[in-house]
Amino acid sequence: MEDRSSLKKYHTTVMLEEAVEYLLAGSRSPAESSESSTPLYIDATLGEGGHSEMLLNRMPTKCRLLSIDQDIEAINFVKRKYHDLLDEGRWILVNENFAKIDQIVRHVEEEEQMRFTVHGVLFDLGMSSRQLDYENRGFSYKESNSDQPLDMRMDTRLGVKASDLLAVLDVKQLASIIREYGEERYASKIARTIKEYKAGVQTVRDLNEVIRKAIPVASPALLTKTQSRVYQALRIAVNSELDSLSQALTSAYELLAYRGRLAVISFHSLEDRIVKKFFNEQVGEGHGVLITDEVIKPDEKEVSKNQRARSAKLRVIEKS
Ligand SMILES: C[S@@+](CC[C@H](N)C(=O)[O-])C[C@H]1O[C@@H](n2cnc3c(N)ncnc32)[C@H](O)[C@@H]1O
């Protein structure tokens, strides 16, 4: 087995302290769990295991941690990096979509032959820096990725890649994805240019060329912004990210025990809108109390060290 330090991390965990502290400071204490049930925390987005590691180190020893990721490479990385922590037997890893969080918990309960009381669930949405650097999935528009196929599946068991969407959907459908999920004003022009591309848009190079052609004056700043919006839109569509999030929030909240906490870190307005609306509905119906009245953002020090943190927003609700 490798030494933990020999495996390099690519991802800097965002709002590590804040997210873990908010989750563990719930007014439900693990000591309240009955003899017949085991207190459980869930990290629904394992990634490189940053939040999970701190949760394991800080949660009371009688608790278990269930960490989920739909990307098998994230699970495999964590298995190798943290084999010593996994050997302690308090940490369960599951390779699934968090939209199935309720089925996952029931399945683990059956397998482990125990009942869980869920004290907290954390979502740190989007992609990890490791995924952006994958060599074969075309997640990033960087020129060095030009030869990569436009795959964009986080879960390679899914059937439809980004290049399939570009081939199969018509101009109107593509424009609507790029407009809705990328909030991109040149959506129609980009969609038309995709469909006019002779050989079919297959690679990062092809898509970058299409975007360059479609926007009026390709200043470097406009080009980068447009690329990041179009890539985001396709990634959201391929992975059904917003539907998964909506479904997962509802299921995770149902799983939570009274006074358990749900914490979500989002990175763009489409995600944050869903989280905010869901939290407000729970409060409105008397099912929850907002712990973060105002959304929490990373401080300047964190943003200066990690550019990816600049758009992060943390919201926390406690079930009542
Ligand atoms: C921002 S990273 C999490 C980073 C992690 N908190 C850390 O500190 O290393 C998001 C992770 O969530 C996973 N993910 C995104 N959507 C998911 C979904 N619907 N179901 C399961 N995992 C998902 C991604 O594959 C990625 O590994």
Image (spheres, rainbow, N blue to C red):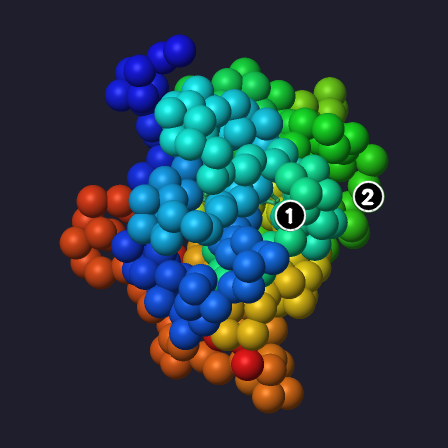
Q: Mark 1 points at which residue?
A: 114
Foreground pick, 142 / 47: 47
Amino acid type at image mark 2:
Asp
At a point 58% along the width and 68% down the height, the residue shown is 257
Q: Where is residue 113 in the image (x, y as percent from the top left)?
A: 68, 43
Foreground pick, 163 / 307: 307
Q: Which of marks 2 and 1 is in front?
A: 1
In the image, is residue 147 above or below residue 99? above
Q: Where is residue 252 in the image (x, y as percent from the top left)?
A: 62, 61
Residue at disc 1, CB closer than 8 Å to ligand 1: no
Q: Mark 2 points at which residue?
A: 170
Do we see residue 91 in this rendering?
yes
Secondary structure at badge 2 equals loop
Secondary structure at badge 1 equals loop
Q: Position of residue 242 (x, y in %)?
A: 65, 56
Foreground pick, 293 / 39: 39
Foreground pick, 175 / 262: 262
Q: Where is residue 88 in the image (x, y as percent from the top left)?
A: 42, 32
In the image, is residue 198 above or below residue 117? above
At a point 32% along the width and 61% down the height, the residue shown is 21
Amino acid type at image mark 1:
Met
- Around disc 1, counting alpha carbons within 10 Å, would you say few (fewer than 14), some (14 to 19), or many (20 or more)? few
For marks 2 and 1 on the same chain, the one whose residue lies earlier in the sequence: 1
At a point 48% along the width and 68% down the height, the residue shown is 32
What label does residue 240 carry, if any?
none
Q: Quadrant of the N terminus?
A: top left
- Around disc 2, counting alpha carbons within 10 Å, would you say few (fewer than 14), some (14 to 19), or many (20 or more)? some
Do we see residue 127 in this rendering?
no
* Residues at circles 2 and 1 in contact by the CB criterion of under 8 Å: no
Q: Residue furthest front?
A: 35
At a point 62% along the width and 21% down the height, the residue shown is 149
